Image (cartoon, grey):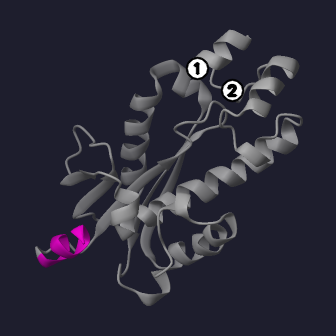
Amino acid sequence: MIEDRLIASGATRIAGVDEAGRGACAGPLVVAAVVLKDIHSPVLADVADSKKLTPSMRESLFDLIIEQSISYSIISIEPSEIDGIGLHRCNLEGMRRAISSLDCEIDYVLTDGYSIDGLVIPNLAVWKGDSVTKSIAAASVLAKVYRDRIMVEMDRKYPGYGLADHKGYVTASHQTAIENIGVTDIHRKSYANIARAQ
């Protein structure tokens, strides 16, 4: 495990960073960072890539990960900012914000797939990091659960789009609702399918 090699080299506080909502056309991009107390703790045995867990498993792990962390942060980037500077820049900026919001000294940062230019803390982009490192997997659960809760709330505010079900991702039913009901403030207007519907 990558974390074991880092720990052996003296890096004791390792931050895992991941996002949720990158592929959605509605709702925020959410980035989480977390420093776990002990990546080998038995209570974290079920922590895995959030996409491989059921919603109920993710929910049960959310508070557990927070309890087992030295520090964590969750950053939400709104659709207007995504439209303004682009998704990829927002993703990197969200990672920077999440890391800088941690309230402890960090020895090393592990990110899922994307390196962070200009970060002064040593860092490594890990391919499929949420599947191969416990720290990134934990961050993926925090980001996913936090964002899903936002989208359930948005479903109450914007009924008829099915946001609680598809969480703002592009589905046939979501696209039909956009075309029939219209584009809302939470839709990413720079996305092609949304721009066509305006």
| Residue wearing tag 1 | 191
Q: Which quarter shows the N terminus?
A: bottom left
- At 62% from the left edge and 24% from the top edge, which residue is drawn? 188
- Rate crowding at label 2 as few (under 14), some (14 to 19) or many (20 or more) other CA atoms within 10 Å: many
In the image, residue 30 lies in the stretch drawn in magenta: no
Residue segment shown in magenta:
1-8
In the image, residue 5 lies in the stretch drawn in magenta: yes
Q: Position of residue 112 (x, y in %)?
A: 36, 51
Q: Nearer the viewer, residue 142 or 42?
A: 42
| Residue wearing tag 2 | 187
* Residue 185 visible, this angle: yes
Query: Mark 2 belongs to which amino acid?
Result: His
Pointers 2 and 1 in contact (C-beta within 8 Å) = yes
Which residue occupies the extreme bottom position in the image?
Answer: 42
Question: Is the residue 47 above or below the residue 109 in the image?
Answer: below
* Residue 103 visible, this angle: no
Query: Mark 1 belongs to which amino acid?
Result: Tyr
**Would residue 196 appear left or right of 49 to someone viewing this image?**
right
Asked which secondary structure carries label 1, the reply is loop
Q: Position of residue 185 (x, y in %)?
A: 73, 25
Q: Which quarter shows the C terminus?
A: top right
Q: Position of residue 163 (x, y in %)?
A: 77, 41
- At 44% from the left edge and 89% from the top edge, which residue is drawn? 42
Question: Is the residue 15 above or below the residue 96 in the image?
Answer: below
**Would residue 107 appear left or right of 138 to someone viewing this image?**
left
- Picture quadrant where residue 178 is located: top right
Asked which secondary structure carries label 2, the reply is loop
- At 34% from the left edge and 66% from the top edge, which residue is drawn? 133
Q: Position of residue 44 (x, y in %)?
A: 47, 81
- Picture quadrant where residue 6 is located: bottom left
